[in-house]
Amino acid sequence: MRNDNLYNIRHSLSHMLAIAVKKKYPHAKLAIGPVIDTGFYYDFDFSGGEAPADKDLKDLQKQMKKSASSNLDFKKEELDEKEARAFFKNEPYKLELIDEFAKAGEKITVYKTGDFTDLCEGPHVANTKEINTDAFELSHIAGAYWRGDEKNKMLTRIYGLAFENKEALDVYKKFREEAAKRDHRKIGKELGLFTFSDLVGPGLPLFTPKGTIIRDVIAEKIRSIQIRFGYERVWIPHIAKKELYQTSGHWDKFRDDLFHVKGKGDAEFVMKPMNCPHHTQIYASAQRSYKDLPVRFMEVTTNYRDEQPGELLGLSRVRSLTQDDGHVFCAIGQVETEAKNIVTVIREFYTSLGMFEKDSYWVSLSVRDPKLPEKYLGDAKNWDTAEHMLEKVAKEEKLPYKRIEGEAAFYGPKLDFMFKDAIGREWQLATIQIDFNMPARFGLEYNDKDGKKKTPVMIHRAVAGSIERFLSVIIEHFAGNFPVWLAPVQAIIIPISEAHLSYAQSVHEQLKISGARAMLDESNETLGKKIRNAKLQKIPYLLVVGDKEKASLAVTVESRDGGSLGQMPIEKFIQMISLEK
């Protein structure tokens, strides 16, 4: 139970919201009203009567402030099961919670505030005079399934913001406004990067040519870095027998999240939710010697997970997620070197995005929860060894790491790289995971120097992680203003008039031959509108051509980030842009 003052204020405000709703909508049934990171919410069932809309929030907020100014006490009482049932006899959601408390043998407590009583464990403020009425506001209304289960009834959720003071509230509102401007769903639509189709299905994004360029460039960037460390590309199918995941240990943990596929035979298949079990079978397809190790596989491939419809969100949470996946099979003495090589790949990739700077990232050394050993597969001694190895790598690579208990994968510890975006939000993207368990479960072997068969260690690594989720992060990080090497269109040629179109076409051809991603504006719009349209597309370079440029075989360059660069020969521009790719 939390007891800090802001938590108590937020929790108390959820009750104040319920008071205001019950006053205006007596037919409303109460569900739950918890605290969240930015404030609070309360879920209501308005069946059989009027329901509030966003336009009604100001009136509800006004009523909350009026109640808060009445200096109401929050008083806690304990009820037995019979008393609780009698009191909440007309509140079906509260009765369901009382059933659970009674079965678990837990205490049933309520908080009374004026004439209002709610089933609640607390804590709350002692009196509403502790609430700063200028430091909260109701923000929006959304739908939410009862208990988060789509099989249950859809309720109405009213959200509120609450902070220590008005200044903190205003800062957060500005942050939220900036986040809304950067929303990857909005920018992705404006730039024409991806779309969704009701016929294809929710959580299954379709990428346009521009969006596909970005995906391919990301994958190629990662491949070009890690190929220097001996990684080789492999390919695997998109379905597998369920026995593969039973052997790997994933089945018991993820079976409810899988798409099941029935073929003509008796075998049960699933759409693959991850790639590591497949990669073990490629390793197992040949005899391996210690001289062959490390064996390093890499692949960019799509996995499928049956997420709850209510949890799907743009590219952030999808049902088809493409992973830049890699696995290393090595001897235990090679683990640290391989892990350091992966750190180098991660460092180089995120440096190219300007995200590997001091104070812009940290690393979670994610280890077991010692209180819950049953959550993890494998031998405790191997876990100790793996955790020690990763901590040593983090120290020697001078990574800003923190040891976080309980965040390990069920098969091994990991280094999770946490990056801050341009407005300070934190995202877990790259990861390095050590696994002693899966190779043993699949009986993987290699012949060691002494002629004995040994089990290799498996290192899982992802640089971008899910490409879809990574794209959602960087679209918002850059607000669509991608660095030149990543931009789907790096330069646009804009002829001043139709008379300059032929020369513009020749410039376009030269840029394409050089490898630059360029497009030509052949529209009949005015020069001003062409430039405005190009800027709305956030294209890094605008190349204007007219009589002067045609006469001198040049282009007049305007940089998205650096303003006017003046006139320059085409060759010079090509040389300049090639350095940024």
Image: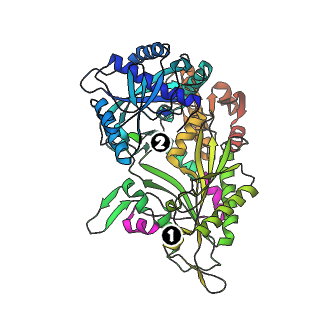
| Residue 439 higher or lower than 430, as above or below | below
Q: Farthest bottom residue? A: 451
Instruction: Tally the marks.
Output: 2
Give the number of the disc on residue 212. Answer: none
Callout 1 amino acid:
Thr
Q: Nearer the viewer, residue 512 or 84?
A: 84
In which quarter of the view is residue 492 placed? top right
Give the number of the disc on residue 280. Answer: 1
In which quarter of the view is residue 553 placed? top right
Residue, x 68% and y 70% (percent of image)?
334
Q: Is residue 523 visible?
A: no
Q: Which region of the structure is painted magenta?
A: 221-248
| Residue 537 higher or lower than 463, as above or below | above
The C terminus: image quadrant = top right
Q: Position of residue 78 (x, y in %)?
A: 41, 34
Residue at numbered disc 2: 315
Q: Position of residue 56 (x, y in %)?
A: 38, 16
Of the image marks 2 and 1, the number of the one nearer the N terminus: 1
Q: Is residue 170 visible?
A: yes
Q: Image check: 239 left or right of 221?
A: left
The residues tagged by marks 2 and 1 sit, at their Cα atoms, a distance apart of 29 Å
Callout 2 amino acid:
Leu
